[in-house]
Amino acid sequence: MQALGVMLLIIGIVLSVRERKYRMMWRSSQTTPNQLATVLSQLVGTAGGIYLSLELLFSFLKIPEDWWSKSEFFVEPLAAFSLLLAILQPFGLKAWTRFRK
C-alpha cells in the first residue's frame, strides 16, 4: 500500500513539475539555465508555505495536535496534505484560466 502511495506521489510530482515548467516557459521570454531546479524550488516553496499556513491555522484554532498528527503514519499528514495541494496547484490554475475565458 505504501509503494502505491509513493508511486502516485512521484507521478503527481512529475506531472506537476511538467505543468509548472510549461507555464514558466510561456510566462517569461527568457529561458533560465536550469528550469528543472527553478520549478522544483517553486514546488517545495509552495508546499512549505502551505504547510506553515496550515500549522499556524491549527495553532490559532487550538486544534489538538494528536487529532491530526497520528504517530502511525510514515510522514506527517499535514506535510503530505501540503505537498498534495502544491502538486495540484498548477492544474487548478490551468482549470481556473480556462474557466475564466
Image (tube, rainbow, N blue to C red):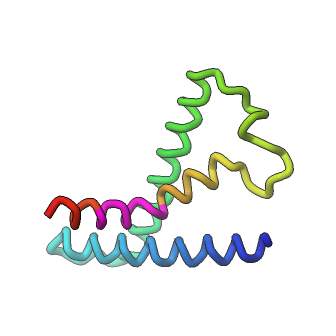
The residue lying at 30 percent from left, 65 percent from top is 95
Q: Main secondary structure of the magenta part?
A: helix
Relative to 1, is 50 on the left or the right? left
> Which quadrant holds the C terminus?
bottom left
Report the number of discs.
0
Above or below for 90 versus 30? above
> Which quadrant holds the N terminus?
bottom right
The residue lying at 78 percent from left, 33 percent from top is 66
Above or below for 79 versus 24? above
Relative to 20, is 16 on the left or the right? right
Could you tell me residue 92's position as x and y percent? 36, 61
Above or below for 83 versus 39? above
**Region in magenta:** 87-95
Could you tell me residue 44's position as x and y percent? 50, 58
Could you tell me residue 29's position as x and y percent? 14, 74
The residue lying at 19 percent from left, 68 percent from top is 27
Above or below for 91 versus 21? above
> Toward which corner of the image does residue 35 lie, by quadrant?
bottom left
- Residue 51 magenta-drawn? no
